[in-house]
Image (cartoon, rainbow, N blue to C red):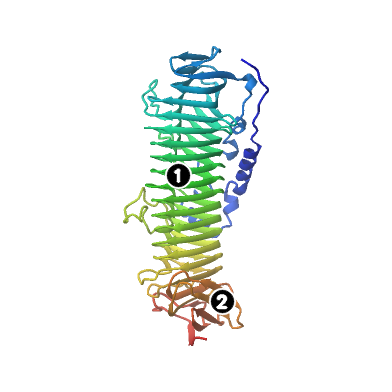
Amino acid sequence: MKRKNVRKIYAAALAAVLTAALAACGRTDAAQTADIPGREGAEAASGGRIGTIGDLPDPEEMFTDRDMAGGYEESESIVIALTGSSASCEEKSVSVSGNTVTITEEGTYVLSGSLEGMIVVDAADTDKVQLVLNGVEISDRESACIYAKEADKLFITLAEGSRNSISGESYTVQDDNNVDGAVFSQCDLTVNGPGSLSIQAGEGNGVVSKDDLAVTGGTVTVTAQGHGLEGKDSVRIAGGQWDIVSGKDGIHSENKENGEKGFVYIAGGELSIVSDGDGISAGCCMQIDGGSFRIVSDGAKGVKSAGEMWVKGGSLFVDSQDDALHADGDLTVCGGTLQLSSEDDGIHSEVTVTVESGELEITDSYEGIEGSSIVIAGGEIRLNALDDGMNAAGGNDQSGFGGRQGDGMYRGSGPCITISGGSVFINAAGDGIDSNGDLIVTGGETYVSGPEDDANGALDYGGRGQITGGILAAVGSPQMAVNFGDSSTQGSILTNVPACRAGDRVTLKDDQGNVLVDYTAESSFRSVVVSCPQLQQGGTYILTAGDSDTEITLESLIYGGRGGFEDRRGFREERRPPG
């Protein structure tokens, strides 16, 4: 074998991205979140699970240095020349039988050429084997193109500047293993390197690992009738540009024998997924720290976790038929930029949805955010909903599909919506904010354009309605309009107004003309709820809605009651003519 200069491909950029992602939000523990108002109620509803990520390993341990490196030393590599229906290699660790190439020892193997057959790795269970694809075309009509029968770990490295293709059609049982992917590994599998790869999987999956699957590089397209990427114990992504079209899930991790495995962790990379199943599905839990995603799910959920889900960073676009983000456990957003569109819920948790930071836009949904409880502690949120903007424990999963019962019932207790920070803009055809338990507002800015019909209200709660801080303006129809209750320590005004249109402004001024609240409605309305810290008992204020001015004197903190003022107390108002 001709010896060449040592070639090393460094991954400093990848390492920097990963380090930044890990530091961006950090692991949210009890000490960090104890001061978030409403957290205790949410923790009670979730069984005390807020602030944990189950048994997910520490992010710093997700990838080894070799996973991230994506390079190899040519001088220490073994060259395998693929020759169409066979191959040639001088090393004893490589055997060729017809169109099957078998590797039996640890080492780095550089492959080039074309092969209508299979590459098999059958080494000791302590061996690490690296396959460097340096301009290969491999196809197999009956099984996997690359099949790791046994090893400790398989690395598939895409050589710099190389173009590679793998194409499988159908799959048969190999060695009592249900081989069902164009790339199939019984051991840990890492795909890295700066080259490109096209994977076509006819009846099966694109890339499969029956242990951990790691992706840290490559420009890769995957077209599969089954899953695009599948890792039984985990799927971990730190880099690369992957374009996946799949008949089932785009990315899938599930271990039915061990419920503590089957997780998805993403720290970076660019992912484009078009799937008939879920875009990304985790059987245990999921954490997203970074990366750029574009997910279109034609028949299922966009991003789904059977346990907890954390979104800590990254740019995420999801267009799905079912929920855009779905977790059977707690779902927490504490970073990133999210643009979600769904025919069902934008965000759904069977337990608690928490938003601590980040930019979240739900452009289309049946219900915007739904969970047993909802905690808004920060971030910038804009959402549009055909039904409720936020719903705590009141709906069913898949409620956007004719009210069908979903994957599971809510497991929390004591539903509650708590808003303590951030800015929230809601445009909802149903209830703007609907809690089947308490509605607690302690801070932040909340603006609601609620229903135009009389069957819903801008605000709705079944337990305690309390405001102690923050700015809130909610407009909608008057019939079901509701104000906050007497336990509030901040003033709140509910009043009917002449018919106003979408685009009309609602402003609240004090008697000196200072603007306290200013909001432009996104729907027509005839009722306004407004609250801000400057409201004082005994004070006089001017509420302007469209062309109508109303002078209001607060004889008590809560001005106006429920449903067209049947329970109106402690107020005096004077309607002023326009101008």
Instruction: Identify the secondary structure beneath mark 2.
Output: loop
Residue 366 appears in the rendering: yes
Residue in the foreground of this view, choosing between 272 and 175: 272
Location of the N terminus (image quadrant): top right
Q: Say which label, 2 or 1, has the lower sequence index.
A: 1
Amino acid found under the numbered disc labelled 2: Leu
Identify the residue position indicated by label 1 in the image. 307
x and y, in percent, of residue 21 in the image: 60, 45
Distance from Cα at disc 2 to Cα at disc 1: 43 Å
Residue in the foreground of this view, choosing between 311 and 338: 338
Q: Is residue 551 above or below residue 485?
A: below
Identify the residue position indicated by label 2 in the image. 535
Residue in the foreground of this view, choosing between 76 and 428: 76
Q: Is residue 414 above or below residue 52?
A: below
- Give the class, few, some or many, for how many residues have Cα within 10 Å of label 1's Cα (few <14, many ≥20): many
x and y, in percent, of residue 104 in the image: 51, 16
Residue at 46% of width from left, 33% of height from top?
199
x and y, in percent, of residue 123 in the image: 51, 18
Residue 47 appears in the rendering: no
Residue at 66% of width from left, 20% of height from top?
4
114 horizontally vs 267: left or right: left
Q: Is residue 54 above or below residue 102?
A: below
Q: Residue 296 has which mark?
A: none
Residue in the foreground of this view, choosing between 253 and 386: 386
Amino acid found under the numbered disc labelled 1: Gly
Q: Is residue 362 above or below residue 262?
A: below
Total labels: the figure holds 2
